[in-house]
Image: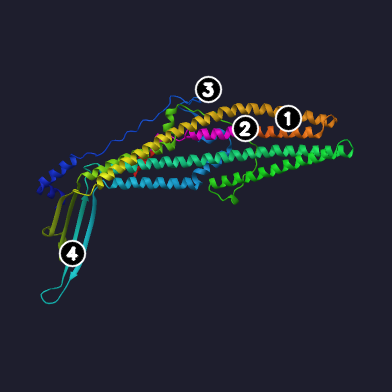
Amino acid sequence: MRPTLFPTALFLHKPLCIAMLACCAAGCAIGPDYQRPDTTTPAAYKEAQGWVVAAPADALARGPWWQLFKDPQLDQLAAAVEVSNQNVAAAAAAYAQARALVAQQRGAMFPTVSLTGNAGRNGGSGALRTGDSYSLGIGASWEPDVWGRLGRNVDNANASAQASAADLASARLSAQGELAVNYLSLRQTDAQRALLQETVAAYQRVVQITRNRYSAGIAAKTDVLQAETQLANAQSDDLGLARQRTVYEHAIAVLIGKSPSEFTLPAAIWQPTVPEVPVGVPSTLLQRRPDIAAAERRMAAANEQIGIAKSGYFPSLGLNASYGSSASRVADLFSVSNLVWSLGLSAVQTLFNAGVTGAKVEGAQAGYDQTVARYRQTVLTAFQNVEDELTAARVLEQQLALRRQASQAADEAEQKMLNRYKAGQVSYTEVATVQASALSARRALVQAQADRQTTAVALIQSLGGSWDAGRVENKNRADVKNE
């Protein structure tokens, strides 16, 4: 039976082995343990009075949030963002890179084993005779994590990977939100154009009426000119909306990873659906918003950097072992008499480096303080976003009711004034004024409906969409464990 390295080494160097095991057993993680800093979290949103209270199985948690708008075309486009948007693809690649770094740092905690071999011939004249030499050996090196530096490297990489996962969720949510706003704005533009085309048709009829009245000597030439001016302005506004629609269409194409020349979105009937968005309590925002989760994970990574820097105050320990054979013939390589082995413990302690280690510790502490400030600012900004969108949603709902009343009144006034003009009771100037007011009221009503939709998108984004920090973090840990 061939002798093995490690049992022999442990028997012959029992004192050395005991010393190494004692060092490993005494190992401890140097540096502060991570605790999430406290943040000011209100008990309720100030602007959420009368708003929908979120339930554990609320609509945002059951599936993609854009389905709340009940638009099949939007559902199809939003799904394409996740697989085709280049910003999302870049964030996904960054997340994959971060996961690979976790596996790399985890591998540093295990021994490195290497196999070496050599074959050569030496020759010379006189007393130096020609001969062959062969060697074969296996070696291993391991740095025991006595001070916790390697473990903190792993924790640092893992926290960074979780922050990258949150960045990916942020990129996805941002792209999906931008797509939803552009799509809803495009459909609102379709509605505005349909409204203007109806108005243009009505103005054309009025132009014909004024021309007939002018030909009959009932109306002045100025009536015809005013009617034609009003018609031309409406037609010009329709062209402006057509240009704006193409801008939205091009933006949607880029968001789903297509060239604008390859993408066309036909006009369709606009469904101004405004979903009821459950807002929950402010404390849930810390788990739902991916940007908050990313900032919190970066704090955890920065905290590990403090421990890594502090480990520089302590000696670096290493274990090295080798086992091999050297002979002049290949057949003799496996002879017991030619076998050699070695086992050693090394320690390196920095005695003087002009305060470099202390500076690294101070820098790591300052970096951590910076991430804490950014985390707290991110939380405050998130609460501000929600409060702003809640205010906007409430005000726009009230404005919509008033816009609808104004539009109905303006329509009635327009019809009555046109009847009076046909009867010769008023001048066309009065008709033109009322018509302009009616068109403005109709367009304002459509805009109010669109604003409520885009505000709902913004509110959903400010609440974190359908993203779940705990689910992503657990998945990330499982992925790293399986690698």
Residue 399 position in % (x across, y down): 62, 28
Cα separation, mark 3 vs mark 1, equals: 33 Å
Was residue 469 drawn as part of the magenta stretch in this picture?
A: yes
Q: Point out the residue furthest to the right here.
A: 216
Q: CA distance from mark 2 to mark 4?
A: 87 Å
Kindly identify which residue carries mark 4: 134
Which of disc 4 and disc 1 is earlier in sequence? Answer: 4
Query: Count of labels shown?
Result: 4
Q: Place residue 289 in its image quadrant.
A: top left
Q: How many residues crowd mark 3 within 10 Å: few (<14), some (14–19), many (20+)?
A: few
Q: Nearer the viewer, residue 216 or 480?
A: 216
Q: Are marks 1 and 2 in contact (CB under 8 Å)?
A: no
Q: Between label 3 and label 4, give the one nearer the viewer.
A: 3
Q: CA distance from mark 1 to mark 2?
A: 17 Å
| Segment tinted magenta in the rendering | 450-474
Left or right, residue 333 beside residue 236: left
- Look at the numbered discs 1 and 4 and tell me whether their residues touch, using CB distance below 8 Å: no
**Mark 1 → mark 4, Cα distance in angstroms:** 102 Å
* Location of mark 3 (residue): 50
Residue that label 2 marks: 448
Residue 201: name its quadrant. top right
The residues tagged by marks 3 and 4 sit, at their Cα atoms, a distance apart of 86 Å
